[in-house]
Image (spheres, grey):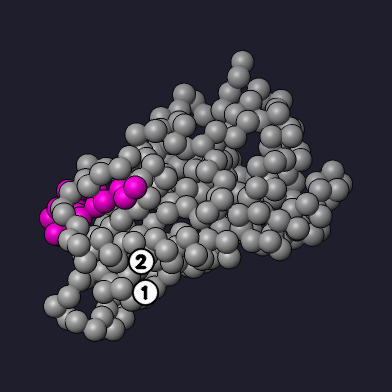
Amino acid sequence: MSRIALIAGEGHLASAVAAALDEPLVYALEHLTPEVAAKPFRLERLIPFLDELTELGVTQAVFAGAIRRPRIEPGLFDPRTMAIVPRILMGMQSGDDAALRAVLDLFEEAGIHIVSVDEVLPELVPGEGVLTGEPSPRDQKDAARASEIVHGLGPLDVGQGAVVAQGLCLAVEALPGTQAMLEFARLHAGLKPDPKGAKGVLYKAPKPGQDRRIDLPTIGPDTVRQAADAGLGGIVWEAGSVILLDREESVRLAHDAGLFLWARA
C-alpha cells in the first residue's frame, strides 16, 4: 500500500498539511519543534531513514514548514550516509536552496516522489486579486519596487521578502525570518521621509529559480498582526506562488487593521 510521508518543519503549515492528508507518516529533523507530533530523524543517518520510509511503503513525501539548517555531528554518520556527505556539503556551501535540492534529489533517487504543498492543498495558494482593502497608486509603486528587490536578491539566496515604504527599502528578509524583518521595519519606521506619505508594504515571493517543491513563502494571521504593528499599509505577494494560511482569519485581521492583502501578478 502506497503511503505519504510529511516532513514537518516549524510553524503552522505542517499541522494544516497533516490535517489534509490521509494518515500521513510524520517526521521532523531532530533539532526542530513542529506543531504536529512527529518522529525525529537526523541528517547524519539520512540513508537509513530513506530505507525506513521505503520499507513502510512510502512513495511520496511532502515538506511543510520552516526548516533550519541542522548542526552536523560527524561522529553520528553511518557508513552509507557518509558516502554522500560530499554531495550534501557541496549543497550547503552553495546556500540553503542548493542544500535542500541535494536532499530532495536523494529522496527521489530512493523512489520517493516529492509532492509540493500547493499540489496537496491548492486552495492555500491564492491566485491574482485583492483579498481585502485597496492598494493606492503609491502602494502599487512600493510593491513594484519591493518585487525588484526580492528578485534581485534571489540569486544570492538571501531571503524571500522585503519591506518598502515611499520607494525606500526599510528591511529585507534574511536568516532570522519574516518576523525579525518586520520588527526591524517597525523600529525604523521613522526613516520614512514623509510621515503622511505611503505607509509601506511587505512583499513576499519565491526566489527566482527556487524549487517549488519546498520552502514556498508563507504568510498568515501572525504576519498580518506583525505588519500592522510595523505600521505598514498592506501585504503583497506573488500570485500563485505564496502560501496563505487561515485565509478567513487573515482577511478579517487585515480588514480590522486597515491593511490590504494583494496577490499581485
Q: Is residue 184 magenta?
A: no
The structure residue drawn at horizontal position 25% and vertical position 81%, both measured from the top left corner, is: 192
The structure residue drawn at horizontal position 36% and vertical position 38%, both measured from the top left corner, is: 124
Would you call the spot at circle 2 few (<14 residues within 10 Å), some (14-19), or many (20 or more)? many
Q: Amino acid at mark 1?
A: Cys
- The residue indicated by pointer 2 is 145
Closer to viewer: mark 1 or mark 2:
2
- The residue indicated by pointer 1 is 169
In front: 216, or 46?
216
Q: Amino acid at mark 2?
A: Arg
Residue 202 spot, x, y in % from top left: 32, 63
Q: How far apart in space, not on screen, are marks 1 and 2 (Cα)?
A: 8 Å
Residue 107 spot, x, y in % from top left: 68, 37
In the figure, 111 relative to 1: above or below? Answer: below
The structure residue drawn at horizontal position 39% and vertical position 57%, both measured from the top left corner, is: 204
In the figure, 230 relative to 116: above or below? Answer: below
Residue 261 spot, x, y in % from top left: 24, 52
Viewer can see residue 194: yes
Residue 134 spot, x, y in % from top left: 16, 54
Relative to 60, 151 lies left or right: left
- Badge 2 marks a residue whose secondary structure is helix
Magenta stretch in the rendered image: 249-265
Q: Are marks 1 and 2 in contact (CB under 8 Å)?
A: yes
Relative to 69, 84 lies left or right: right
